[in-house]
Amino acid sequence: MKKEISRRDFLRGAAAGAAGLAAMGVLGGCSNNASASTTGSAETGSETIPDTTTVAPETTAVSEPATTAAAALSNQDTVSGARYAKDYENTASIGIVSEQVTSEENADIVVVGSGIAGFMAAMIAKEQAPDLNIILLEKNGLYGGSTRLAECNGPAANATEEAARASAARHASGTGYIADPMLMYHMKLEAGSNASWLFGKHKVGYTQGGGPAFYEGGNGSIPVDKNLTPDCEALGVDMRLNNRAKALLLNDDHTCTGIQVYNPDGELYNIRCKAVILCTGGMSTNQKLLSYYANQDMEKIIPWGLGQDGDGHIMAEQTAHGRATHLTVSSLFNNVQGFAYDSALGCCATMQYTNVWVNQDGVRFMDESGGGSLGTSESGKVIECQGHVYSIMDQTHIDNYARGGATRHYSGFADLIAGAETPAIYDELKEYASNPNVYTSDTLEGLATAIGVDSAVFTATIDTYNKSCETGTDSEWGKDAKYLWPVVQGPFYAFRVSSGMLNTNGGIRINTNAQVVDARYNPVTGLYAAGVCTSGWDGEVYGGGTCQTVGMWAGSKAARHALATIFGKTVAGDWYGELMEVASGGPGGGPAPEGGSEGAPQ
């Protein structure tokens, strides 16, 4: 694998990439009990870290359903090892402590996963407490996880109290109150500090102009290799590749005392420590496990990701946390099953407002543009909400796209074809002719038969749509006239569309100190979680700006809270370096617009 891998190279390189990752161990694995205070605050020099945990009254425990590790284990299939997903093939026995260990060692803090959350947790902990033994575990054969492929809003401003609360209220309302407003509130308050640490103190590059800033032009592998990895090594963090965390070591369901790990040879060893920070990413690469937690039908989704196997979610279930909570399937692009990620034909067939979408009944079910503002996340959910979605094109569509007629800036490679000549779609029509999700016929009646819908219904649907194209007024759904292209010239094409899942968001419940908590928000002492493995950020639709920014905030908060409350360390008031000046509402700033750039996991 190239050291400075590009988003396009990684996503396209299925064969070469798999071979390279296997060689580095990617395909085989991932990225003393002092109790944290549960009330009041911890003074840490010039910075005060509030501990906002609410402890449920003891009287509530009598009537609450059992959520302990023992209760979870009583439901466990001893072969699978998953607490609730009994049929899940847990071949690595994640979440099950083994007695067969080759060695045991001690550390202070163990961080699991080396995405942005893991780097910030490990590095901030070591910067503020150089005497502590900090271990960073990465199950893959290279550092960075899916952060290598991600974009991130640039320099930010810490929000005012008023702005943070307003932003949190809007966000929670927009998710139907699935998201936790307190998490968003605290993240907004520290947005500038965390961004200053990344872009200022550690000199990660970013680009600006015409919208949100992305580090190194959206190629996350550059800051991982150029800045974060060498800086982390220079600090003295004990960094270990090809080491996969297997299970938490617990005194009881509310007390974590360490972690069990596979070494690169597949042998097990224990690390006894006072704090474990789970930065393990989502579970987009483990569809069997995901099928137990997601509301979406996995048959309609194209998976993508790097080492997002849900390991952290399963380990959290060992504790009083119990079952993983709400998961968002972050669908950020549409394509056809079996097409390359950067297929020009796929981009034209599934990502343009100018096509006609019909469902399993052969009827058109919406304005394909969503009023001209259908975002990438929403577009994927539209696909998932129907039994089948077919994108209908005629030969004129094909020819128009080949001449540069694609207009929609969508995500990744799709942006490159907007307004550009794309003759490759002719070759891809031949290449994918035998794909079972591609249908063609010289007549509309024949196309209806090919996709298995009633011919009369389908032809009536297209006839109504064509009349709307003639008048420039969509009589059914109100699509803007500029997107109305008639379907009249054979041959005719239908492409069964799937949504593309770049990652999942959610699963592990945390409080505003990034501590893993039970259903009543009682913390699991010594256990933290950060990044997209944590819940409370999104509803059914990925809202934008809740990947890298969440990882930054939670990784930072977990490290600082652990140092102050478990180790009694002083966290400097300027732990982030120097606050970067950002205009109000600037890229990623406090009162800035919600979300991030369309189509990028941020």
Image (cartoon, grey):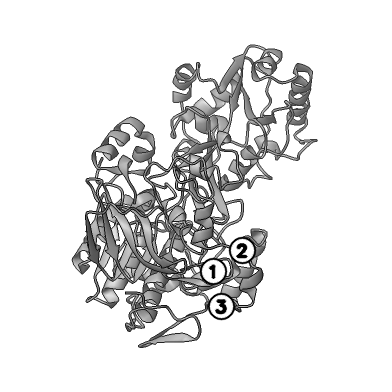
State which mark lies toward you, 3 or 1: 3
Q: In which quarter of the image is the N terminus?
A: top left
354 to the left or right of 478:
left
Residue at screen point 46% across, 22% down: 428
Mark 3: secondary structure: loop
Toward the viewer: 429 or 247? Answer: 247
Q: In this view, does 47 lie to the left or right of 462?
A: left
Label 3 vs 1, first from the N-terminus: 3
Circles 2, 3 touching at the beta carbon (< 8 Å): no
Gap between marks 3 and 1 measured at Cα: 14 Å
Mark toward the viewer: 2 or 3: 3
Pick the front one: 63 or 418 = 63
Q: Earlier in the sequence, mark 1 or mark 2?
A: 2
The amino acid type found where label 1 is placed reads Leu
How far across and how far down the image is residue 524, in percent? Answer: 46, 69
Which mark's residue is nearer the viewer, 1 or 2?
Answer: 1
* Placement of 583 over or under 94, stated as above or below: below
Q: Can residue 269 be seen in this view?
A: yes
- SS for dot 1: helix
Q: Quadrant of residue 137?
A: bottom left
Mark-to-mark CA distance, 1 and 2: 11 Å
Residue 92 against residue 442 in the figure, above or below: below
Label 2 belongs to which residue? 171
| Neighbourhood count class around disc 1 (C-alpha, 10 Å): few under 14, some 14–19, many 20 upward | many
Tag 2 secondary structure: helix
Q: Distance between the residues labelled 2 and 3?
A: 23 Å
Query: Which residue is under mark 3?
Result: 54
- Residue to which mark 1 is pinned: 183
Q: Toward the viewer: 458 or 318?
A: 318
Disc 3: CA contacts within 10 A as few (<14), some (14-19) or many (>=20): few
Amino acid type at image mark 3? Thr
Write down the quadrant of residue 223 in the picture.
Answer: bottom left
